[in-house]
Image: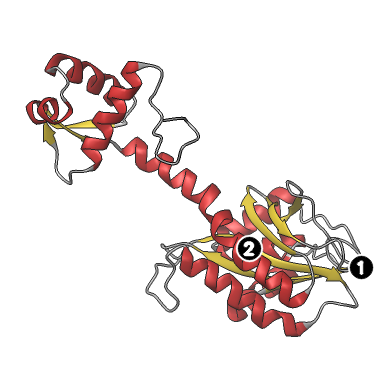
Amino acid sequence: MKKSDPGYEATPAVQVIERMFALMDLLASREDAISLKDISEKTGLHPSTAHRILNDLAIGRYVERAQPGSYRLGMRLLELGNLVKDRLSVRDAAMGPMRELHKHIQQPVNLSMRQGDEIVYVERVFSERSGMQVVRAIGGRAPLHLTSVGKLFLAADDAQRMRSYASRTGLHGQTRNSITQLTVLERELSKVRQFRYAHDNEELELGVRCMAAGIYDDQGKLVAGLSISAPASRLEEAWLAPLQATAEQISQTLGFVPGGSYQER
């Protein structure tokens, strides 16, 4: 069987890695801790070999000893899994709905996430045949208080964290419409919390307006924002409903339950 064949399963080039995979797959298949004796029997590894590999995995917290002679998966896997979930699954879940939204409104659709005091554009859908449009570069960054997605994240912060952001950044503006006063920003964020969407009214760039809706994970945490950017004269409020519906669809794919009981964050 060739590597290109559908049924081909690759084997690690290093034998100890193959054995490590076997051990972790076995631990993943059981809810409770497993004794070294059972591990040896199920994997076909000599007890001393299994013990040595498990001990090395325990050093990295990939495996933990539930009690002497018994093992289960460790918390490091949960930490890494959450990182992958935050960084990759949102993009994967979003691309299909983003394409459908773009077909409907014929304007670029952006997916953004928060990194510190900025939002980062991580994905976009646009067509080169859509005429005049605003296309954000993937990897591009912008201050939270000057963008519609950024306002969603600031609105999700508690008051102390939001004021710390204002103090740290100075709320510097980039256009005459930029919000540079804390009291004005607080009023704006109050509206965002009330209506659950946000606008950028030429605050980042003159001639460009934007609207955004939040994307939430299975814990009710805001993990990304979906936005539409357009020339100021062409942005239509009628796009807001399909934008919100698309953001909710992506959220539900991530496990979010609309109207669910989530703790305030």
Q: Is 108 displayed left or right of 155 in the figure?
A: right
In the image, taking residue 179 as reference, residue 241 lies left or right, namely: left
Q: Amino acid at mark 1?
A: Met
Q: Is residue 48 above or below residue 150?
A: above
Labels 1, 2: front one:
1
User: Tag 2 or tag 1, which sits nearer the N-term?
Assistant: 1
Image quadrant assignment for residue 227: bottom right
Residue 180 point in image, percent of width and height: 80, 62
Residue 36 at x, y = what percent?
11, 26
Q: Residue at x 35, y 36 (%)?
A: 76
- Mark 2 Cα within 10 Å, few/some/many (few <14, many 20+)? many
Q: Is residue 196 visible?
A: no
Residue furthest bottom as drawn = 238
* Identity of the residue furthest to the left in this view: 37
Q: Which residue is mark 1?
A: 132
Which numbered circle lies on residue 44? none
Distance of label 1 from label 2 (alpha carbons): 23 Å
Element assignment for label 1: loop
Q: Pointer 2: what residue?
A: 225
Return the x and y of residue 263 as percentages of the image width and height.
40, 67
Residue 56: percent from the left, percent from the top?
Answer: 28, 19
Amino acid identity at mark 2? Gly
Q: Residues within 10 Å of mark 1 (few under 14, many from 20)?
A: few
Q: Secondary structure at mark 2?
A: strand
Cβ–Cβ under 8 Å for marks 1 and 2: no
Is residue 245 something one can see in this rendering? yes
Residue closer to the observer: 6 or 34? 6
Residue in front for this viewpoint, 68 or 98 = 98
